Image (cartoon, rainbow, N blue to C red):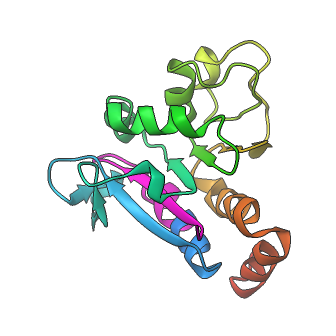
Amino acid sequence: MAEKVAIFVADGTEPAEAIVPADILSRGGVEVDLVGIMPDALVRFGQGICIQADVSIADFKADDYTMLVIPGGSEGVERLGGCKKMIDAVSQFIDSPGCYVGSICAGPTILASNGLLEGRKATCYPGCESGFPAGTYQNSDVVVDGNLITATGPGTAYAFGLALLAALKGEAAAKEVASGMLIK
């Protein structure tokens, strides 16, 4: 199966944390779907930015994807954290060979609250780590722990996107996209 990524989005999602990784992955030749969990396919990101989701959660099938990504934004995370279908898919992916989970900003709190960070290393937006298991939190912009990739927030969305791409397509592909985008 070709690499395909689902980035879950809801009203209140931080726009940079969904769109920047989607852009980087697409430039790297990875198919990306923004999967909206709202009843309407129109998603109102934080800062009032609206987008049309590619796929509704009702039509989402985890088996169609190689990687699942949970962006942040406190209101969006609150909504995403209540999406049982997304939680079930991420729970399935977290320990599955060949599957990846990415999360940025407050998004990793969803993983922590569902017991998915036990024995893992991860990062998140500063101050959101209080629910992490002991020894999990790493004070780094991006943390890659096997098939789990986490990052701190909007300012690290480019590094996060490149880490996601490197996991799927290799370091050379990530460096090529970074060079084309003038990312140092």
Q: Quick one: 29 or 10, which is closer to the camera?
A: 29
Query: Residue at left 31%, top 47%?
Result: 10
User: Quick check: can you spot residue 107?
Assistant: no
Q: What stretch is highlighted in magenta?
A: 1-20
Residue visible at 51% across and 19% down in the picture: 113
Q: Residue most toward the left?
A: 40
Q: In the image, is 40 to the left or to the right of 135?
A: left
- 33 relative to 20 in the view: left or right: left
Quarter the N terminus occupies: bottom right
Residue 34: image location, x then y, percent: 39, 61
Residue 141 at x, y = what percent? 75, 46
Q: Position of residue 9 (x, y in %)?
A: 36, 51
Instruction: Give percent across and percent down for residue 74.
Output: 41, 36
Quadrant of residue 129 within the rendered picture: top right
Q: Which residue lies most toward the right here?
A: 172
Q: Quadrant of residue 73?
A: top left
